[in-house]
Amino acid sequence: MSDDAAQNWVLPHAGKRVALGVTGGIAAYKAAEILRGLQRAGCIVRVAMTEHATRLIAPLTFRALSGTHVVVDDYAPDNPDPIAHITFSQTVDLFLVAPATANIIAKFAHGIADDFLTTTYLASTAPVVVAPAMNTTMWQHPTTERNLAVLRADGVHIIEPDAGEMACGTIGPGRLSEPDKIVAATLALLDTKSNDLTGERILLTAGATREEIDPVRFLSNRSSGRMGSALAQVARARGAEVTLVAGVMSVDVPAGVRVVRALSAAEMHAAVMRELDRATVFIGAAAVADYRPAKRADQKLKKSGTTLTLTLEPTPDILAAVADARRDGLLVIGFAAESEHVVEHARAKLTRKNLDAIVANDITRTDAGFDTETNSITLLTRDRATPLELPLMSKRNAAEHILDEIARLRQQQTAQAVK
Ligand code: PMT
């Protein structure tokens, strides 16, 4: 390789190296935006395309943007690298395929290596991220679902497509996730120290619940879902499969995370119990209402001019129900939002609800807890007498610490099982 970009590629000192695979979907043109986003973050990006992709966007576009040769056919005489599929797969920090067609997903799932991109996938030692894009019917076809399940089980990170209007005019899921979301998910993965949570299936609740009083009024709280969203993003980046049972959230759900919507405590309880069988870890980060109106009025309540008394009844305790239904190996992690005697009250919840760990939040602080960017948490685990008090940090960093603790608990559990 002679040009500067290629030199940087061989001597990887100028940033993280990303191999970008582009396949033949109508969204192929969006790969140029993804490439630019990654470059802006300092990544060195090289591009490989399938033959079909070159019919939708010219390799020259990617060559101009990346400043280096774009591989389509590694046997082509103009390919400067005689072992390109090895260079591509084994000297990169991450292999991203966007857009990924149903065809490439099927080939990856079945180990078919009949062109440069599929051979590269098989030879890859780097984390692989796949951003599917296809027609809704193809996306929902059982074959595609089966193939994606195989990829997930093989540790591939899937960035779920968005729902919306497709090029073919149909409306539904299948549209390539937004380029900035794909870039953010890729960078999050690159930031992550390891794939230490690969194999874990994390079920997580986040956000506030909403308990209806009548068709227009409800009881709720100030949870933004930011803490839960950070946990989902970091867990995904560390290799876990994540299902987020989301209440009312004022932040986006991170790419690559499966979302189940559940607004009330009862809906959240039902969704969690439905999903629990597959989970290896449960984290209750949602601020679930403890009480709901005993009866929801069918019609809007009229102002009477006198006092209105609402009778409230307790909601199901989701965390306690999960701990009660615990199977061998399931780790159950709770949160405790406390305004006084934070550690003592959190310790009492840890014991009473039979949890493996609890994350205590002091909600009297203005820079921690509900609807803040930062958090100041204390981690309590069943196996340690001394709580781990952490300083104020971003919710993302707090999530890293919580997941470090989960990884440690899992290691300990595995070591005990071997004894
Ligand atoms: O969403 P953010 O704005 O980022 O804010 C984050 C947060 C403060 C909401 C979050 O970090 C947090 O502390 N979540 C738990 C809030 C809460 O409801 O705490 P609690 O102490 O009342 O409940 C204890 C635990 O039981 C929690 O894990 C809660 O999810 C669970 N619970 C509570 C009631 C109920 N009916 N079912 C439950 O599962």
Image (cartoon, helix red, strand yellow):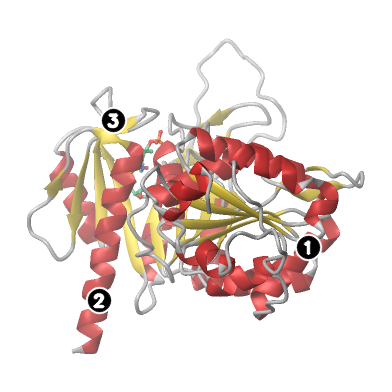
Q: Secondary structure at mark 3?
A: loop
Side (left or right) of 393 relative to 105: left
- Specify the quarter for ligand 1: top left
Total label count? 3
Q: Amino acid at mark 2?
A: Gln
Position of residue 187 in the picture relative to residue 257 (left or right): left
- Asked if marks 2 and 3 touch (Cβ < 8 Å), the reply is no
Give the mark, 2 or 3, whose residue is nearer the N terminus.
3
Q: Pick whichever, 386 or 67, lies toward us.
A: 67
Kindly identify the residue that appears in the image at 34 percent across and 65 percent down.
196
Whether residue 209 sits left or right of residue 120 in the image: it is left
In front: 122, or 109? 122
Q: Quadrant of residue 109?
A: bottom right
Q: Which residue is mark 2?
A: 413
Which amino acid type is shown beneath numbered disc 3? Ala
Q: In the displayed orientation, state which residue is furthest to the bottom.
A: 419
Of the numbered discs 3 and 1, the one sitting upstream in the chain is 1
- Badge 3 crowding class, 10 Å Cα cut-off, few under 14, some 14 to 19, many 20 or more, is many
- Report the front residue among 111 and 258: 111
Residue 140 - label: 1
